[in-house]
């Protein structure tokens, strides 16, 4: 039990919970007691959203549909209000939230998310994630690969070992997938001796 004779006492609660506080007033022989129950709650415990990367420079995002469930990670959605901002300051002040559909304007943007309980909304937390607009890869045009079908059976062997580099050039972090005319995947790295 904590007691104080100060005119304006303060107390720091060490953990969340419901507490009863009392103030005893005394004037002469008259004593009165004021009792109040207070709830100490912490900010929501949520998941930090994952970053987004896209090559589509015209992509618009509906953050509520895309990120809310990820952030709440099983918490009841009806108990929380989630809003998105372009700066930490705006999220902290809860001003200028982003529209429900958002189109990035820069190659790298940080989006700030304010998550607060609908009841007792004084408690909130701010998380962030990054949107990165990647440059789309370019595929170099390559010439057809001629081959002579000596036995005229419609099949021949081809050296495909340099094709991937011919198509992608010096681009990095590119995943190239190849298919034959029957839409069957050809494993990479491409073989030196591929038979159609």
Image (cartoon, helix red, strand yellow):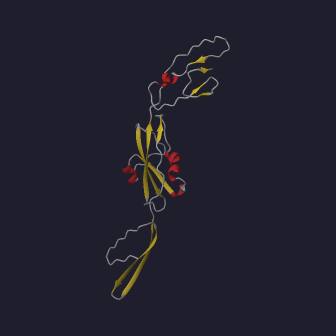
Residue found at x 43% / y 51%: 127
User: Is residue 143 shown left or right of residue 105?
Assistant: right
Count of marks placed on residues? 0
Q: Quadrant of the C terminus?
A: top right
Q: Quadrant of the N terminus?
A: bottom left
Q: Nearer the viewer, residue 73 or 91?
A: 73
Q: Nearer the viewer, residue 53 or 193?
A: 193
- The image position of residue 83, as x and y in percent, is 46, 51
Q: Nearer the viewer, residue 62 or 160?
A: 160
> Quarter-wise, where is residue 4 in the image?
bottom left
Residue found at x 62% / y 22%: 181
- The image position of residue 129, as x and y in percent, is 44, 46
Residue found at x 44% / y 41%: 131
- The image position of residue 41, as x and y in percent, is 45, 64
Compared with 194, 20 (above or below) is: below
| Farthest residue, direction front | 192
- The image position of residue 157, as x and y in percent, is 60, 17
Residue found at x 58% / y 20%: 193
| Farthest residue, direction right | 153
| Farthest residue, direction left | 7
């Amino acid at each position: 039990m904590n007691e104080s004779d100060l005119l304006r006492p303060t107390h720091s609660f060490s953990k969340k919970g419901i507490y009863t506080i009392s103030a005893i007033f005394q004037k002469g022989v008259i004593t009165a007691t004021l009792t109040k129950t207070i709830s100490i709650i912490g900010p929501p415990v949520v998941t930090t959203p994952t970053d987004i990367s896209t090559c589509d420079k015209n992509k618009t995002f509906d953050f509520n549909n895309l990120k809310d469930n990820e952030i709440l990670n099983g918490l009841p959605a009806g108990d929380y209000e989630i809003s998105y901002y372009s700066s930490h300051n705006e999220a902290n002040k809860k001003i200028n939230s982003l529209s429900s559909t958002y189109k990035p304007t820069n190659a790298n943007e940080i989006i700030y998310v304010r998550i607060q309980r609908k009841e007792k909304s004084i408690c909130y937390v701010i998380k962030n994630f990054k949107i990165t607009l990647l440059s789309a890869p370019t595929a170099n045009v390559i010439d057809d690969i001629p081959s002579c079908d000596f036995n005229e059976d419609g099949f021949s062997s081809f050296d495909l070992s340099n094709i991937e580099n011919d198509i992608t050039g010096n681009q990095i972090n590119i995943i190239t997938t190849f298919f034959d005319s029957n839409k069957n995947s050809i494993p990479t790295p491409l073989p030196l001796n591929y038979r159609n």
